[in-house]
Image: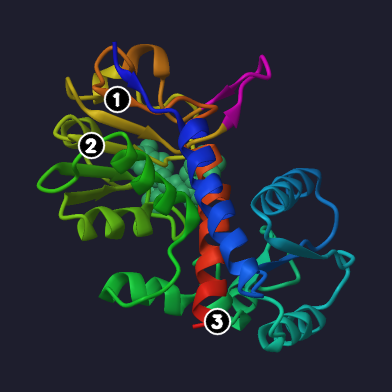
Amino acid sequence: MAIIIDGKAISQSIKDEVKAEVAELKEQGITPALAVIQVGSDPASTVYVGNKKKACEYTGIISKSFNPDENITESELLAIIKELNIDPTVNGILVQLPLPKHISESKVIAAISPEKDVDGFHVQSAGALMTGEKGFVPCTPAGIIELIKRTGIDIEGKECVVIGRSNIVGKPMAMLLLKENGTVTICHSRTKDLKSITKRADILVVAIGKPKFIDGSYIKEGAVVIDVGIHRGENKKLCGDVDFETAEPKAYAITPVPGGVGPMTIAMLMKNCLEAAKAANM
Ligand code: NAP
């Protein structure tokens, strides 16, 4: 039986650690604050934003909401970000994606001050991760490193395979595994003979965006399997990019969906906000 990596419990520990540090900061007169911008009222975004605000409430971080109409122009949105960049009472700025089609996401992300880029999507943050400088790391891959480490799994020297090369998951994931001294391979849609590569993996991170794509036949006996995917099946049940039923018997440890990677993203966002507040008050 594989170890089922409990993302709910681990994320709870991280939120509790953040909460304790926020309380200490408050005693010194510092209150971390996150500005959350949601353009329009897409129902999925509303749920994500709501969960982020709840986590802020739990940890003691102030959340300041901005909910402009979906017809806001790009320059009006950029003006809001400009204001928040110079607002000393705001430590982190989060723009919920996706944005309406008439607004350039890359321009908006580029407008956020790197010191407040708690999502870690700014090119300066990406560059810092690449070169080993200080900077914010995207929350999902940062959370995966925590899941692996807090399960007592050593990354150093391990054969690590990441499926997916998106800017928010695959690429930063690969850089973080490399930073931990893993030997890293990145796979994508043009990779030839995917299975021959995944079967070498001691640690396999799957961020492919296709429900149950990776079954047990892709997995080496005794591997650690991290499933980043999240999909709602026809029966309304959530599932990941990994076929849990056939993968679990092969794995040494595996993340479930739900309750694996998902809860970690928000916990790491809280951690990034705390770090932003600490850095701003150093
Ligand atoms: P994405 O931008 O769609 O990237 C998917 C990646 O998978 C791409 O790099 C693509 O390759 C690769 N791919 C597609 N088909 C493939 C195939 N047959 N063989 C090998 N590689 C293949 O997705 P993402 O944003 O990284 O997200 C991945 C999954 O994680 C999604 O299910 C998403 O919902 C989930 N997610 C979850 C969280 C969370 O908090 N739990 C956070 C973010 C994302 P190309 O680059 O060649 O197209």
Q: Residue furthest front?
A: 27
- Depth check: 84 or 96 in front? 84
The local secondary structure at tag 1 comes to: strand
Question: Residue at (55%, 53%) from the top-left corner?
Answer: 20
Label pair 2/1, CB-CB below 8 angstroms: yes
40 vs 253: above or below: below
Image quadrant of ligand 1 equals: top left
Dot 2 corresponds to which residue? 153
Residue at mark 3: C-beta within 8 A of ligand 1: no
Residue 236 colored in magenta in the image: yes
Q: Residue 6, relative to residue 29: is it above or below?
A: above
Instruction: Name the image quarter holding residue 78.
Output: bottom right
Q: How is the image coloured?
A: rainbow
Q: Is residue 99 visible?
A: no
Tag on residue 280? 3
User: Label 2: how many residues lie within 10 Å, few (<14), some (14-19) or many (20+)?
Assistant: few
Q: Nearer the viewer, mark 3 or mark 1?
A: 3
Q: Which residues are magenta?
A: 231-239
Residue 136, image x, y percentages: 45, 69
Instruction: Work out whether 79 lies above or below 139.
Output: below
Tell me which label, 3 or 2, sits earlier in the chain: 2
Viewer-nearest of discs 2 and 1: 2
The residue to which callout 1 is attached is 253
